[in-house]
Amino acid sequence: MKRIILTVTTDLNYDQRMQRICRSLHRAGYKVLLVGRKKKASLPLGDQPYDQKRLRCILQKGKWFYLEYNLRLFFFLLLRKAEILNAIDLDSILAVRLAGLFKKSKLVYDAHEYFTEVPEVVDRPTTKKIWEWVANKCIPAMDACYTVGAGLAEIFEKQYGIFFGVVRNVPLPVDGTVNPEEEGEKILLYQGALNEGRGLEATIEAMLLLPSEIKLWLAGEGDLSVSLRNQVKEAGLEERVCFLGYVLPEDLKRITPKAWIGLNLLENKGLSYYYSLANKAFDYVQAGLPSLQMDFPEYRALQEEYACFELLENLDPSLIADAVEKLQDEEYYLERVQNCQLAAIEWHWEKEEKKLLTIYENL
């Protein structure tokens, strides 16, 4: 039985993508260990069929955190036997690459995003140069690479001279037909990190342009948690905007179908967001939920397959409000719901995991 160690910097309880990947590898007969990060507020690890480990760090953010985490991860990997080491994004690849120099393990890189082009990096020249150096030194040394969309795969192949497979970040299929709530409040739902570039400030501004019966739920926390709460308070929207905090994946599956419209709005700031293909876009589809997405290449391609979305050119609050108002037309809205139900038959993990397993089988 081949052993795989997969490495992330996230809290394992909330990482739906890695939970899906690890379960698939476990079912395929691999012995799987997922290594992540223990935060001060981390809950006890949930039960999983694979092994889990969280590393405790003194530092919690910034470049020194990444250095500390990679040092701890390097020594952790060095002392454990594994045929395959997997780095998820650049923030754990250095430890994996260095451990690979001392071990005979195959090295795999899973690029969930274009790390050097995320908003938190792209406007910081020194930070960007450091991560570009890490990428140029480590990625070409990998034995296999994959990412979440065709656009990113093409960019990475040209940049690093190595083939990238595509494994889309789609959810498991939902049993039976799921329909959004037909009665009650009309809820706009955002699920994910409350971070820069996610269109959250503009969405809150748009709430001032929408009827009072429309509510906004934000499921997650992040760097903007405090400032967004202050914005809501200053706008007098406390009764219409609800911060749900961190939500476990199993709880999110129950919350999402209660919404009316899903939100995945990104600022065109860096190529990572422009070529993104977020799991939340597919989560909304599986819940039968029409959603607002950006008119970026991957979302445009999906829209051409099944018209599940309302695509926005930019994050002007008036455009967000107009798109929401458009979906108030009951006939138009139900047409989008039906399109989601058709797309859900195709866009799910049981089909996508075959691509994942092929990558590992070919190592």
Image (spheres, rainbow, N blue to C red):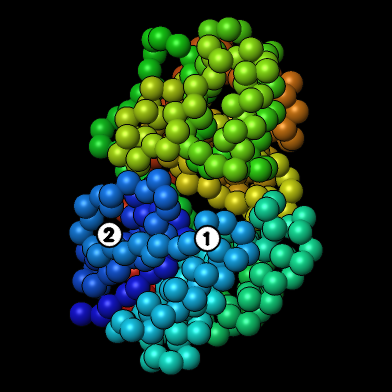
Q: CB atoms at circles 1 and 2 under 8 Å apart?
A: no
Farthest-out residue, front:
58
Q: At x 48% / y 91%, what residue is drawn?
A: 101
Q: At x 30% / y 69%, what residue is drawn?
A: 33
Residue wearing tag 1:
59
Residue wearing tag 2:
23
Q: 158 above or below 219?
A: below
Inspect the image, locate mark 2, and give the three-letter code of the amino acid beneath it.
Arg
- Tell me where residue 280 appears, x and y as whole percent: 48, 41
Q: Is residue 141 left or right of residue 348?
A: right
Q: Could one spot residue 62 in this view of the protein?
A: yes
Helix, strand or loop for disc 2: helix
In this view of the protein, which residue sits in the foreground, 72 or 11? 72
Q: Nearer the viewer, mark 1 or mark 2?
A: 1
Q: Is residue 294 left or right of residue 346?
A: right
- Tell me where residue 13 appears, x and y as whole percent: 34, 49
Image quarter hosting the C terminus: bottom left
Inspect the image, locate mark 1, and give the three-letter code of the amino acid beneath it.
Leu
In this view of the protein, which residue sits in the foreground, 188 or 200? 200
Which mark, by number, is residue 263?
Answer: none
Image quarter hosting the N terminus: bottom left
Q: Is residue 291 left or right of residue 42?
A: right
Looking at the rendering, which quadrant does residue 345 occupy?
A: top left
Crowding at mark 1 (Cα within 10 Å: few <14, some 14-19, many 20+): some
- Tell me where residue 35 appears, x and y as whole percent: 37, 66
Q: Is residue 93 left or right of residue 232?
A: left
> Which of the marked residues, 1 or 2, is nearer the chain's N terminus?
2
